[in-house]
């Protein structure tokens, strides 16, 4: 049975449409324009594309976008000072520092400097801890987007065996926590995992976040599985492709996300959702 496509672009358009209405209602009620500051350090080509898309989509929903583009050799102190200023600026509700950062800057130090209430990436140890403890506030955008895509299938998640390939702080680990919160049985795989194909063959849900084109082969996929492909790679033919052999996997899966047009647009939609959530929580905070 050929897989049904989980259309992330269409779902992201629905989410951003509803965010646009809520932003307009906020502004009409005289509350502040939710504003996202995006910090880009250096000229990493993929990061430049991601950041451009984030800034553009922020503006299309009527939110404020503040751009900070810093040179690749900027001192860590300068980045930390900028974050201090943004933390203290009441007109800024969300702060995102695009990763990776150049080697002279420690990402952990930068992430920890962000006010957790403005941490729209959900990477601050406080927000990660809240997720671990099943009390989530701001949640990492890509895993949250994957959960919204899984919800679109209409299939109950409790009891399903989910195999997450990749253990990064940005995707793999928070993804496993999200799936666990929905009562999946979760296996996290990484480069030291033995018999990856065997584990994937037993999975009801496969989330691939490895960063290698077509790494997950179609014949690893169990009949009727749900396949979520987080990878965005440039294939040998120059085209964008995911971490999963799409054609092979689509012959066996019940549902599959395409690349592009799957997880990617949902990551940005969740970033905007987090920014609105942060603005509403900051509004509700006692002043002074
Ligand atoms: N680099 C790759 N993905 C992300 C993301 O979701 N947030 C940030 N800040 N950097 C990234």
Image (cartoon, rainbow, N blue to C red):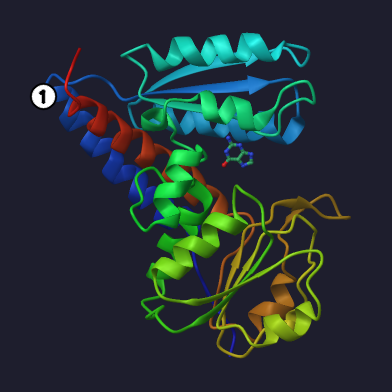
Residue 246 image offset from top left, x and y in percent: 70, 71
Up-down: is 81 above or below 47? above
**Label 1 SS:** loop
Q: Is residue 136 left or right of residue 212?
A: left
Residue at figure coordinates x 80%, y 60% from the top left: 213
**Res. 98 image quadrant:** top right
For residue 2, say whether it is visible: yes
The quadrant in which the C terminus is found is: top left
Residue 122 image offset from top left, x and y in percent: 47, 41
Q: Is residue 171 left or right of residue 192?
A: left
Residue at figure coordinates x 78%, y 20% from the top left: 104
**What residue occupies the far left of the structure in this picture?**
29
**Res. 210 image quadrant:** bottom right
Q: Which residue is mark 1?
A: 29
For residue 52, say whether it is visible: no
Q: Is mark 1 within 8 Å of ligand 1?
A: no
Residue 166 image offset from top left, x and y in percent: 69, 60
Q: Nearer the viewer, residue 123 or 147?
A: 123
Residue at figure coordinates x 13%, y 19% from the top left: 30
């Amino acid at each position: 049975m050929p897989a049904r496509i989980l259309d992330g672009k269409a779902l992201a358009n629905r989410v951003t449409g509803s965010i646009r209405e809520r932003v307009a209602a906020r502004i009409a009620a005289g509350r502040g324009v939710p504003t996202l500051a995006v910090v880009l350090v250096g000229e990493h080509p993929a990061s430049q594309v991601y950041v451009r898309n984030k800034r553009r989509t922020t503006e299309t929903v009527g939110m404020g976008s503040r751009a900070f583009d810093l040179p690749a050799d900027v001192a860590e102190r300068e980045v930390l000072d900028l974050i201090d200023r943004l933390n203290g600026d009441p007109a800024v509700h969300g702060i995102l520092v695009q990763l990776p950062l150049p080697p002279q800057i420690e990402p952990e130090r930068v992430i920890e400097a962000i006010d957790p209430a403005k941490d729209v990436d959900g990477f601050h140890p406080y927000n990660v801890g809240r997720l671990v403890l099943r009390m989530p506030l701001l949640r990492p955008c890509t895993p949250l987007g994957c959960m919204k895509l899984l919800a679109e299938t209409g299939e109950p998640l409790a009891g399903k065996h989910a195999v997450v390939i990749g253990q990064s702080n940005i995707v793999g680990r928070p993804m496993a926590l999200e799936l666990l919160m929905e009562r999946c049985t979760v296996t996290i795989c990484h480069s030291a995992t033995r018999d990856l194909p065997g584990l994937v063959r037993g999975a009801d849900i496969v989330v691939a976040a490895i960063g290698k084109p077509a790494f997950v082969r179609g014949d690893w996929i169990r009949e009727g599985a749900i396949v979520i492909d987080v990878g965005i790679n440039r294939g040998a033919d120059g085209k964008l492709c995911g971490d999963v052999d799409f054609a092979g996997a689509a012959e066996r899966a019940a549902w599959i996300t395409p690349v592009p047009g799957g997880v990617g647009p949902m990551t940005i939609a969740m970033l905007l959702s987090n920014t609105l959530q942060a603005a509403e929580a900051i509004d509700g905070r006692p002043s002074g």
